[in-house]
Image (cartoon, coloured by chain):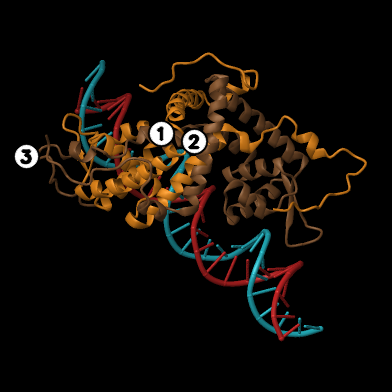
Chain colours: A orange, B brown, C cyan, D red
DNA sequence: GCTTATTGCTTGCATAGTGCAATTGTATCT
DNA sequence: AGATACAATTGCACTATGCAAGCAATAAGC
């Protein structure tokens, strides 16, 4: 990977980009980006499996996994559990139903809520994808020690909390807060 | 419009989902998903800032950050650096140029390569977004100890490596390989 | 030289995904 | 009953993405 030497004669002058760069973001070391890269790669590989094979979209798979974990949930609960908006969830459920992987039943007490469940075919598909997902997980985890894995679990729990707080407050909440790496008091973040 | 599939479950049967669930994927504890959630939240918050304010798309921001880190790179190098395909990169550059945030110059030696650089406005925008990004980073990092952060760096490096390997081999490489991960019970067992 | 790949990049178009307003159906409140 | 609130869906416009084809510049073969 050779850089293209196309420098525009800034011999006498200081390179402006160098000056501009100082203190600015380094993408490769930016924590969220590092997390993003890893998870995207895995999601891509998994998606390359379930997409062509079952005709599932990404959100459909996500919803399927959520429903598999808690059968009979409503769409709204799926939204909260998966960080998805109600439209995606509604469409994902629609797709799952059309593909024969799930079915809705109106809630018994309150018929506004529709309880979603996987069908037989849905469970089959889920187990197959789930199997591959666990292999992926295993491969990742296999690259670090058990001790590291425990520690990682703790760390991720904290990061998860912090990110939820950030999301809840939005970017306005950060424009005012001073400091780059300063620690802020924890806020009880809404995840009831 | 669509006919809801007739109910054929949970009539007189034992709950099948309990049996189905065992050994299957738990989304909340699935490592890639945990990483995904954290990074998405942060990306959403940041995107909610630079999107409306500068009219940047997600890939445009990514490309901008990459270009800021290594001014004068070609589109191809951006692809590799950011895990993006050439089409997104091309369009992102186009958008950056149209917004006045970047400019291309044909390479001196090989004019197929176009060297991309940020403009003054581009640097201004980048610094502003970068600033917020660093606050986000700071807030995340602030939620864990410095020691944890060091450890996390190591772990992420390993996971990064492993995920790159997974991506390179694709899902076929995992169907056969017996990973260090979990095994799944293939046999449907009767309820105990 | 001339011709034929090859490479880096762009574009057009079809498809898939997303966001928002409006709508339906249900429950609750007065 | 009517008004109101809520879960969920849908229509429509918009954006993003994937892929085939294309263009321009270079490299390789003759």
The residue indicated by pointer 1 is A83
**Can residue A87 be seen at all in this image of the molecule?**
yes
Residue A69 picture location, percent across and down: 28, 35
The residue indicated by pointer 3 is B12
Q: Nearer the viewer, residue A1 or B130?
A: A1
Image quarter of the C terminus of chain B: top left
For the residue labelled by badge 1, is the local secondary structure a helix, a strand or a loop? loop
Residue B52 picture location, percent across and down: 59, 37
Q: Is residue B54 left or right of residue B173?
A: right
Which residue: 87% across, 38% down? A14
Q: Which mark is residue B65?
A: none
Residue A163 picture location, percent across and down: 49, 26
| Residues packed near mark 2 inside 10 Å, few (<14), some (14 to 19) or many (20 plus) | many
The lab-note entry on whether marks 3 and 1 share a chain reads: no
Chain bearing mark 2: B
Position of residue A76 relative to residue A133, above or below, is above
Q: Is residue B159 left or right of residue B75?
A: left
Quarter where residue C29 is shown: top left
Position of residue B134 relative to residue B33, above or below, is above
Q: Residue furthest top?
A: A185
The residue indicated by pointer 2 is B40
Query: Disc 2 and disc 3: Cα gap in Å?
Result: 43 Å
For the residue labelled by badge 2, is the local secondary structure a helix, a strand or a loop? helix
Query: Disc 3 and disc 1: Cα gap in Å?
Result: 35 Å
Chain bearing mark 1: A
């Amino acid at each position: 990977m050779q850089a293209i030497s196309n420098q525009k004669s800034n011999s006498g002058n200081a390179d402006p980009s160098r000056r501009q760069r100082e203190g600015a973001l380094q993408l490769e070391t930016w924590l969220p980006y590092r997390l993003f890269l890893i998870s995207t790669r895995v999601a891509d590989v998994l998606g390359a499996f379930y997409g062509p094979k079952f005709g599932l979209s990404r959100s459909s798979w996500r919803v399927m996994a959520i429903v598999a974990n808690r059968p009979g949930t409503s769409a709204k609960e799926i939204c909260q559990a998966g960080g998805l908006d109600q439209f995606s969830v509604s469409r994902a459920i629609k797709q799952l139903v059309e593909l024969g992987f799930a079915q809705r039943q109106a809630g018994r007490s309150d018929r506004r809520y529709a309880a979603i469940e996987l069908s037989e075919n849905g469970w089959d598909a889920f187990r197959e994808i789930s199997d591959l997902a666990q292999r992926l997980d295993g491969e990742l985890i296999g690259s670090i020690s058990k001790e590291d894995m425990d520690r990682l679990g703790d760390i991720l729990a904290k990061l998860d909390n912090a990110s939820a707080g950030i999301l809840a407050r939005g970017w306005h909440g950060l424009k005012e807060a001073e400091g780059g790496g300063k620690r802020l008091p924890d806020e009880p973040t809404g995840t009831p």
